[in-house]
Structure formats: structure tokens, C-alpha cells
Image (cartoon, helix red, strand yellow):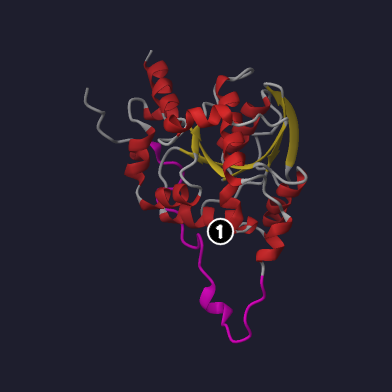
């Protein structure tokens, strides 16, 4: 019973605070006959699990860290849906260049380009190192990627009676930075439901609404336009940031620590 209540609490927050007011506008958004998605995130089962949830079956392997992109397709409420699962990045060590190249290649596997990047973030401890690692890898797709990004929160059922909005506030500026970059577009999904998942259709509607707002899909060729050679007088060493060079504090999710919050009063 407690689990049911926790899932209901997460479901109420699934669309973000702006979604309630925007539901009427979302209903007017024309349905896409095809939706192309790229899933991004850490080397954590929640990323591939989310892909499996959308597909409706176990297509993305969870038992080992993927080194290559994997593309699968399904149909969701009359839409042809393509999902590309990408190699996850490490929490506290450098990602090999070959992994980064494969990560970027994921956007080209669903031509002419993905409608949405699903940035999977498990509920738990989110530190400055996490934010830096996330920025390091998402930026490989160029600044325009944020216009097509939705944050997907997983494992939100552990929050129980704590609302997702309250959790986001408690996590502080690091998580707030990520959400501001994608215009506070986020969605909660429960990866413990298999088969026909009631949230998947809602997620597709959220993607359609974002496509209507941002005017289309992400074009991988636009990334090349953003890449400009350094000025001859610019010292590239000054712009190098050590991302994730130090060991991650509270390694792992640290759920037991992160969730030590007082319950909401009635």
C-alpha cells in the first residue's frame, strides 16, 4: 500500500510544475507518426531499463556495460518509436575517447535526427562532480542539444511521501542547473512495470509537445557548425576544465543518505 502511495506521489510530479497549465495546449499538439529517441546517462541500469520500458520488452542488456549504441523499434499508440541506447559514462573516471565517439554516433542512428534526448538521472545524491560529468558528455552534442532534452528521473519510488519538486529543491544548484538548461522539462518513469506501460504514452505526448515548442528535431549536422577553431592568440590550456578528475564523494547513489528527509506534514 505504501508503495502504491509513493508511485502516486511520483506520478503527480511526472510532468513538472508547468505541465498542469500546459495540458490543454498539449492536447492540441498534432501526433507524430514517428518518434526518434536517444537515451543518455551514467553506466547505471536505470538508463537501459528506461529504454526497455519504452520498448516494452528487454532489448537493451543490463548485465554488462555497453560499449556500442543499440537501436530498437516499437509502436506506441499508433506511433513508430525508435530508441537508441548509448554507452554510459563513468562517475569518477575519464570516459575513453572511443566511448565518446560512439556516444555522439547515437544521434546519427535515427536519421534525419532524434526528436528527443532522454537524459536519465536516478533519484539520489547529485553532486558538483555529477553535474560536471553530465555537462562534459551532453556538450558533445553541441549547445542545441538542450532544446531537445527531457530529464527522466528513475527510482523515484524510493522518495515515498516526498514530492519530486521538494527533492529537486533539496538537491540544490547542481541539479537545478541541469533542469534550467532544458527548460525544466522532466518526467518520472517507473521501470518496474513491464509490458504495456501507462506512462510511456504520456512520455510520447511530452516529446510531441517539446517538438512543437522547439520547432522540430535535433539535426546532428548542426553540431559541426558550432565547432570553430581556436583563435591563434587564445591559449587552449586556459579553457581546459578538470571534469571528474577527483574521486566522487559518496560514491554510488547514496540513497540512504540522500533520502534522510523529514516527511511532509499533513
Image position of 45 with respect to 238: above or below: above
Instruction: Check the image and report above or below for 80 versus 108.
Output: above
Find the magenta span and give its range. Answer: 228-255
From the top left corner, tell me how far across and down residue 213 is, in percent: 57, 42
Q: Which residue does the image show at 46% across and 30% down from the upper left?
A: 14
Residue 45 seen in the current view: no
Q: Secondary structure at mark 1?
A: helix
Residue at the outermost left position: 265
Residue 119 sits inside the magenta stretch: no
Q: Position of residue 131 (x, y in %)?
A: 47, 53
Residue 260 place in picture, x, y as percent? 30, 36
Q: Residue furthest top?
A: 1
Rendered position, 124 above or below 176:
above
**Mark count:** 1
Residue 253, quarter of picture: top left
Tell me where residue 62 sits by quadrant. top right
On the rendered image, what quadrant is the C terminus found in?
top left
Of residues 64 and 236, the one nearer the viewer is 236
Residue 126: % across, % down = 42, 47
Q: Is residue 149 left or right of residue 37?
A: left
Q: Give the residue pinned by disc 1.
A: 136
Amino acid at each position: 500500500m505504501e508503495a502504491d502511495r509513493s508511485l502516486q506521489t511520483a506520478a503527480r510530479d511526472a510532468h513538472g510544475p508547468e505541465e498542469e497549465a500546459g495540458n490543454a495546449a498539449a492536447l492540441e499538439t498534432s501526433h507524430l507518426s514517428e518518434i526518434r529517441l536517444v537515451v543518455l546517462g551514467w553506466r547505471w541500469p536505470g538508463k537501459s531499463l528506461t529504454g526497455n520500458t519504452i520498448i516494452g520488452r528487454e532489448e537493451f542488456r543490463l548485465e554488462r556495460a555497453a560499449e556500442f549504441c543499440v537501436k530498437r523499434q516499437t509502436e506506441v499508440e499508433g506511433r513508430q518509436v525508435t530508441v537508441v541506447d548509448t554507452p554510459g559514462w563513468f562517475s569518477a573516471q575519464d570516459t575513453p575517447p572511443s566511448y565518446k565517439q560512439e556516444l555522439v554516433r547515437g544521434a546519427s542512428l535515427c536519421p534525419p535526427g532524434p526528436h528527443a534526448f532522454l537524459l536519465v538521472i536516478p533519484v539520489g545524491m547529485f553532486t558538483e562532480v555529477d553535474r560536471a560529468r553530465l555537462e562534459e558528455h551532453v556538450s558533445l552534442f553541441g549547445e542545441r542539444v538542450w532544446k531537445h532534452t527531457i530529464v527522466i528521473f528513475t527510482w523515484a519510488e524510493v522518495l515515498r511521501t516526498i514530492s519530486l519538486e521538494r527533492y529537486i529543491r533539496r538537491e540544490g544548484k547542481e541539479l537545478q542547473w541541469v533542469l534550467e538548461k532544458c527548460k525544466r522539462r522532466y518526467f518520472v518513469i517507473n521501470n518496474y512495470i513491464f509490458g504495456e506501460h501507462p506512462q510511456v504514452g504520456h512520455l510520447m505526448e511530452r516529446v510531441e509537445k517539446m517538438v512543437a515548442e522547439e520547432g522540430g528535431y535535433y539535426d546532428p549536422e548542426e553540431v559541426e557548425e558550432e565547432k570553430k577553431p581556436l583563435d591563434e592568440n587564445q591559449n587552449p590550456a586556459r579553457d581546459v576544465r578538470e571534469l571528474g578528475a577527483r574521486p566522487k564523494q559518496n560514491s554510488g547513489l547514496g540513497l540512504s543518505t540522500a533520502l534522510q528527509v523529514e516527511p511532509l506534514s499533513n
